[in-house]
Amino acid sequence: MQGEILLKNVRLVDASGERGPADVLIGEGKILALDGGNAQRTLDAGGLILCPGFFDPHAHLREPGQEVKENLETGLTAAARGGYTDVVSMPNTTPPVDQPEVVAALIKKARQIGQARLHPAAALTQGQEGKLLTEAKLLKEAGAVMLTDDGKTNEDAGVLALGLTYAASWGLPVAVHAEDAGLRRGGVMNEGPVSFRLGLPGNPAAAEAARIARDLEILSYVLERPAQDARLHIQHLSTARGLELIRRARARGLPVTAEVAPHHLTLTDERLESLDPVYKVAPPLRTQTDREALIRGLLEGSIDCIGTDHAPHTQAEKEQDLLRAPFGIPSLEVAFPLLYTELCLKQGFPLATLIERFTDGPRRVLGFRPIRLEEGHEASLTLLDPNSERAVDPTHFASKAKFSPWAGWRLSGWPVMTLVEGREVFVHPSLTVGA
Amino acid sequence: MIAELTQQAAFPKHLLDFQGWNRKHIEDLFETAKLMQEVLSRPVKKVPALTGFTVATVFFENSTRTRLSFELAARRMSADVLSFSAATSSLAKGESYKDTLLTLDAMGIDAYVIRSDAAGMPHQAARWLGKPIINAGDGWRAHPTQALLDAFSLLERLGSLEGKKIAIVGDILHSRVARSGAELLPMLGAEVWLCGPATLLPGGLPNVTMTTHLRQALQDADAVMALRLQRERMDKGLLPSEPEYVAGYQITQERLGWAKPGALLLHPGPMNRDVELEGTLAEAAQSLIERQVANGQAVRMAVLYHLLVGRKGA
């Protein structure tokens, strides 16, 4: 068999566990063989891990309108470097992505860029104003994979109920940023002993839990109506209380899924003691108890997947004080090595499970087919280096945002190659691919 | 005077809060403040201690008493003073805080006194600038020189704070004065009680006791500090009304009777007369309110002196 590239001596790891070693022959955008063959080029990948391509269900790529923070080119390049073959972009741009033409234009542009593939999420309501629904059918046909008002928090329960009901007709999940605006009261960090001591307005865990409880009730309600396919996805879960509500809802069969962000798995509100806005995110960094609960939730599967919530800003914006600096950090380029190092290496989290949460998990949430490491399957794959260790250096990010709460952290498990349908969209300079 | 001071403890570089400060630092600072009081009692209230130094007061939030107090303190030690206000600056034209500070720094500033409505701004400045930063109040978080002058005023009258009960009453949640007091006073041996309406009490601060019961807070107190009631809190629904607050938490002559006989009374100002305090109490013999203001200058002179000169050889 003749292929374009042969990855020799890789360790295959996917949701089913570690299956390597193998010699993976790739051509025509597919996996042609797992037992070698002839290729135009060969890479001896002794010790490297090959897994399905990562899928990020939650990134802010800022286009259209806020290209000063990020654009499709920098965002999708950052994604490819982070091992992502697929990225869902959030619609809270300026203007919001709420029209089919915009969705189609974004996808077209992303194809031309040729890095990670783009799957736009569209707004649930027109202008993200929480009043009138968007055109779910036309948006879906244009390529939207999810509806969400994301940063806006669906204050009107009736509108969310209508949105969930209507989106279900067209097979679109609805994602929510679960946070009660009234309980949040302008909080800039987790409410608790640290916020009390620092004198910073707090955002209580109850703001998330109360909203999740409400949204789960809405989901139960719409499922009793002609909306049996309704699916609710909770974005960037941050609290143990919220997780417990989701766990119970799933136990009684509600179609709710959830994601967690790398920062909520690795950092706590005590980082804010430094008074450095690099730790300012929404929802905020919570407590160690929350962090541990989220790791357990991820392990047991109550949390389906990792969503980066990659949220780039300009340096000047982020260098304001804690009240004024915007929420968010860039994380596409560090998510996997961060969690591999902090969870797998330090805490014994199973590698195959972590990889599942980066690959099949998000695809399942969004109704995509999983990528299998089998002959004939799509060669959208990620090659990881579990052995060498390197420090996070935000100045080298492809993202326009050159800051990171993990700057200087020494991590392993860096992606070294990302293939989208067999095409090498990212190859780390340390790899030498022979002819 | 200088020889005496150089014998004292090595000081932290900044006064952002009391992190990194210990009791010895505070006691040394107060020794200096006493020398400064003596300077302030002279007919010519000026010494050359900071000649050649330039102190910038950078106020991103309005203030009268703190700013004047710092500027006078610097001038009385012969420092040059550069005075910056956000309202009349390029910030209003969109320049960032960082660029504003870097611009000032290019002018050769030796120390910064920074006030901000946001917690952490002086910390940011400390990261950006290599000079001593004095926090003149950041958001709800810290106002260390206010806590120092309060403690200094209490020490003048009580001799020691060891085992003394001090009650701070009012809007604790939004008070940087309360937070800094809660940090500093226990360091000096005092037992601090924080008291206010439940909607204005934070969930927990270390080393202090919190209560919504005024009588409990005032019982056997050696000193009582009333905080300004911030009327905007009512608009946010945290307090039903001013009369409701007065009924529950105003310090009256009668309620002061719950405290020890002759218990001292403080208020960091600005004061809403007849709201936090029964009007006549401000001038009572036990009131330290005027003394707090006077001592503010001496304490700030001591802080500037130590951060600019006293660190030598540290």
Image (cartoon, grey):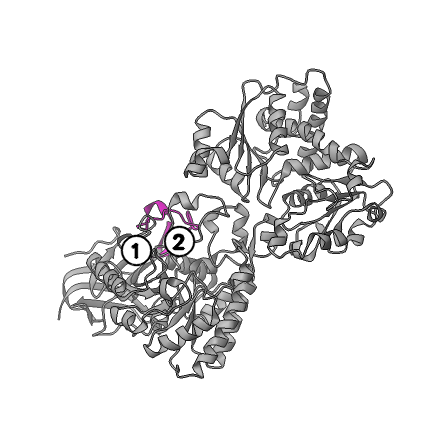
Name the residue: 43% across, 46% down. Answer: A318
The subunit carrying tag 2 is A
- Residue A433 lies, in percent from the top left, at 19, 56
- The three-letter code of the residue at mark 2 reads Leu
- Residue A84 lies, in percent from the top left, at 30, 61
Q: Which residue is mark 1?
A: A64
- Residue A103 lies, in percent from the top left, at 27, 64
**Magenta stretch: residue A393 in it?**
yes
Q: Residues within 10 Å of mark 2 (few under 14, many from 20)?
A: many
**Magenta stretch: residue B199 in it?**
no
Q: Which mark is residue B183?
A: none
On screen, residue A165 above or below B304: below
Q: Which mark is residue A411?
A: 2
Q: Is residue B211 visible?
A: no
On screen, residue B172 above or below A4: above
Left or right of B187? Residue B53 is: left
